[in-house]
Each structure stands twice: as structure tokens, then as C-alpha cells.
Image (cartoon, coloured by chain):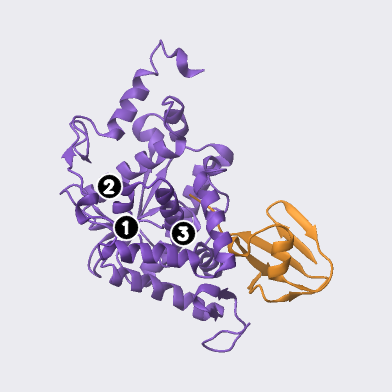
Chain colours: A purple, B orange
Amino acid sequence: MKCRKCGATAVINMRQHRLSLCQDHFLEWVPQQVQRAIEHFRMFAPDERVLVAVSGGKDSLSLWDILLRLGYAADGLYIHLGIPDGGYSDVSQQKVERFAAERGARFLVVNVAAEYGMSIPEVSRRKPGRSTCGTCGLVKRHIMNQVAYEGGYAVLATGHNLDDEAAVLFQNVLHWATGYLARQAPVLPSTHPKLVRKVKPLIRLYEREMAAYALLRGIDYIYEECPYSRGATTLFYKELLNQLEERSPGAKQMFYLSFLQAREEGRLLPAEAGEVELGECQRCGQPTTVPNLCAFCRLWEGAVISQGPQGAEEQ
Amino acid sequence: MKIIYRDKVWELKGNITVRDAIKKVGLQPEAVLAMRDGKLITDDVIAKPDDTIRLIAVVSGG
């Protein structure tokens, strides 16, 4: 297969776009797609400071790489979750450190165990009823917003790609979770002075394209999946959507992008469906939908109590 | 040809496209990238009997 732009040997064929590209043209094409998404969804302006949440995986490191190449003022935030399996969190942090050092990029690290006394697996074990991934998501969202807000960043960017979003959309549709559907967007505006705008600049790109970008760009990312994500439902949904994609190229893109369009045009839900009243947590001061303590502060409070001498429920 | 994916190795016979080889070993073409001699290749490439194709899972990290 030949590159459509120059006729050289193609390294990737994107069936949904009927487009095959050589290495040079693919590495040029991906950032263009990201820039288009940033502009189309009005994610952020060239002079706004961006904090990129980086996990050490292919998507977030590639996103950071692309934003820097596009000339944005993008710093990284790595959250060390304390996942011990094969030094998963330590190795991920090393990948982030090396990436930043090679590019002279600025980044911050928050170590959950050092900051709050317990790692994600530890706090999760003490909180039965909530999945490890649920706990992890809650902790990450809290820390990301706090660091972005305190650091004066205009926007927080995450590396969700189209496959990630399509899988979540599939899940939300299966449950007809209208509240989640109303809020599943490439841009989550700041609806409270302490809530930083969140954006997903990779939403036009397939997972496969992001993996190819990282490989071709020579980005050393953590290849293994998080040990807790094995068998996760979203991975199964991704497989299902890939079966659809195999049968009809572009199905994933159609599913997700036409959802965005339908919602934007008000054909799905009333505009106010996604609106929630936000107050401030009495302890940490961060925005929350519930009175008194936010879910994050309640998580650690419960965890500390069950750590006491009567904590026999640990087994 | 030899197909390598994570810790698995398959031996396939005949001249077939990389796309068919991916399906033959039970993987999804959309979920992997194919490399030969350290270079990314498109899946219409016909693999030769002495080729070694390394498949890279596209889902990773977290």
C-alpha cells in the first residue's frame, strides 16, 4: 500500500478515512487532527496554559508530545497511584520523567501514598463496595482538578481517544444513563470558580492510530495494561466495537461523532439535563455535588476509621 | 511465517496477507499493529514463509 500523499510505502492504513500514509505524512497528519479538534470544540486558545494528565501510557504521552509540537504551553502531571505489580507505578513514572527530560518539559508528580498515607490498592481494599477503578478515578479527578486549579492552569487535558469515548458511550447507552450522556463531552466547561475546564484533544483519533503515533515517534511508553484493568468491562466493549468496525469501517467514529452532533443540536436531551448544582467541600474546598464533604474526602475519612484497632473487616 | 504477540508465538503456512494472519490467530485487525524487521507495515502486505511478524496490542497503559 502506498502513501496517498507521496507514493512512498505506507506504514498505516486507516480504513475509516480510506487513507494510507507513510511515516512522515502520518506523523504530520496526527497533530493536524488534534489541532482541528482543539479548534472545532474550542478547547483552549494558544496563550492558555495547559496541564496534561500523563499516565506513562501511549495516549497521554503522545498528547503531551503533540501539544508541545503544536507550540502550546503544556506541563505534565503524573499521579503515582502506588500500584505495586511489577513496579507498575514506578516504571510509569520513569517513562514520564524520561519523556520530560528529553524534551525539557515541565511536570509535577503527586504520590498518593506519600500525600494521603495510603496507595490506591490500599485505600480501595478498605472501601468495599467501590471498585478499585472507581476509587482510582475519583482520586485522580480530585487531584487533577486541585493541581490544575492551584497551579493557575486554564485547562486540564486528558488523553482519551475515540475508542475510549466510544466504549464509555456504549456503556452509557446500555444503561440509558442520561445524566452521564449529557455530560460526556470533549469539553467540560468550568461551572464553578474552582473547577478547571477539562478537554480531550484526542477524540478524533482511533486507539490504533495513537499506538502507531507513539511507536513511530519513538515514545517509550508503558505497554502493559494496568493490572486492575484486566477483564474490565470497557475493554470488552472496545472488542465489541472493533467487531463492528471490522464489518463496517468507520462504525466507531460514526457512533461517537454523530452522538456528539445530535447532542449539540439538542436532538437527544434537553440542554439542562447535564446541569448540576455545585457547592464546596467543607474540608478541602473543592467543588462537589453533595453537601458537607466531597466524595474524595469521605473516601479517606472512611479509610482512616477502618484502619483503627477494630479494623477486623480487613480480612 | 512466525507471528509473535505478547508471550505467544504461532507458525503459519503459505503466503497470506498480514490481515488474514491476524484473523487466523484469533486477534482483531483493529486491535493490533504489525511490525516486520522493526518497521510498521500495513496489513495488506503478503508475508513470506520466513517472515517474523510482531503484533503490538494497541490497548495499553491506563
Q: Residues within 10 Å of mark 3 (few under 14, many from 20)?
A: many
Q: For the residue labelled by badge 1, is the local secondary structure a helix, a strand or a loop?
A: loop
Amino acid type at circle 2 is Asn
Mark 1 and 3 residues: CB-CB less than 8 Å, in contact? Answer: no
Residues flagged by tags 2 and 3 on a common chain: yes
State how far apart marks 1 and 2 are (Cα): 17 Å
Looking at the image, which residue is at 42% across and 52% down? A168
In the rendered image, residue A306, in percent from the top left (x then y), is placed at 38, 18
**Residue holding disc 2:** A145
* First in sequence: mark 1 vs mark 2: 2
Q: Chain of mark 3?
A: A
* A24 relative to A51, above or below: below
Residues flagged by tags 1 and 2 on a common chain: yes
- Which residue is at the front of the view, B52 or A39? A39
Total labels: the figure holds 3
The answer to whether residue A203 is seen in the rendering is no
* First in sequence: mark 2 vs mark 3: 3
Residue A185 badge = 1
In the rendered image, residue A50, in percent from the top left (x then y), is placed at 29, 60
State how far apart marks 2 and 3 are (Cα): 20 Å
* First in sequence: mark 1 vs mark 3: 3
Q: For the residue labelled by badge 2, is the local secondary structure a helix, a strand or a loop?
A: helix
**Residue holding disc 3:** A59
In the rendered image, residue A69, in percent from the top left (x then y), is placed at 38, 71
Classify residue A203 by image quadrant. bottom left
State how far apart marks 1 and 3 are (Cα): 18 Å
Mark 2 and 3 residues: CB-CB less than 8 Å, in contact? Answer: no
Camera-near label (1 vs 2) is: 1
In the rendered image, residue A174, in percent from the top left (x then y), is placed at 44, 48
Q: Residue furthest top?
A: A310
Amino acid type at circle 1 is Ala
